[in-house]
């Protein structure tokens, strides 16, 4: 099942205080980037973020976005400020984006 544009709008509203958020649609789902770093995605209308020390401290529920994928953490935060703090804490723990040739 693909994620809806309405749910994407909800998540982007939740991420309004996070600088430089971009999305990329892939196979009906959405990848989420902040400052060029992949930090999460929307899978079957579920907002999931990568498993980092910062995200583990804030989010208890693990989910698998699709068969064969690594576990991610289900976002249950519903306010912009807390979401911005979480993404800000996660960014230093995420790898730098790969340079395209």
Image (cartoon, grey):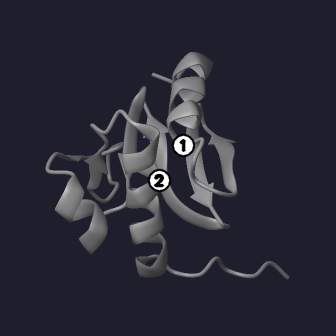
Residue that label 2 marks: 84
Residue lying at 58% horizontally and 40% vertically, measured from the top left: 30
- Which quadrant of the figure has residue 75? top left
Mark 1 surroundings: few (<14), some (14-19) or many (≥20) residues within 10 A: many
- Which quadrant of the figure has residue 35? bottom right
Kindly report the distance in space between the C-alpha atoms of the residues bearing marks 1 and 2.
7 Å
Mark 2 surroundings: few (<14), some (14-19) or many (≥20) residues within 10 A: some
Which residue is most to the front?
Answer: 81
Against 97, is 5 above or below? above
Residue that label 1 marks: 15
Mark 1 or 2, nearer chain start: 1
Residue 27 drawn at (x, y percent): 60, 37
Against 93, is 38 above or below? above
Residue 98 drawn at (x, y percent): 67, 80
The N terminus lies in quadrant: top left
Is the Cβ of the residue at disc 1 closer than 8 Å to that at disc 2?
yes
Residue lying at 61% horizontally and 60% vertically, measured from the top left: 34
Residue lying at 29% horizontally and 61% vertically, measured from the top left: 55
Closer to the camera in the image, 79 or 8: 79
Q: Is residue 69 visible?
A: yes
Q: Is residue 52 visible?
A: no
SS assignment at label 2: helix
Residue 77 drawn at (x, y percent): 31, 39
The C terminus lies in quadrant: bottom right
SS assignment at label 1: loop
Residue 94 drawn at (x, y percent): 46, 76
């Amino acid at each position: 099942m693909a994620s809806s544009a309405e749910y994407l709008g909800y998540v982007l509203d939740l991420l309004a205080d996070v600088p430089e958020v971009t999305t990329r649609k892939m196979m009906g789902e959405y990848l989420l980037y902040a400052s060029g770093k992949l930090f999460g995605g929307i899978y079957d209308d579920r907002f999931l973020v990568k498993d980092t020390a910062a995200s583990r401290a804030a989010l208890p529920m693990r989910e698998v976005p699709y068969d064969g994928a690594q576990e991610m953490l289900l976002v249950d935060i519903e306010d912009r400020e807390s979401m911005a703090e979480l993404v800000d804490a996660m960014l230093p723990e995420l790898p730098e984006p790969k340079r395209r040739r």
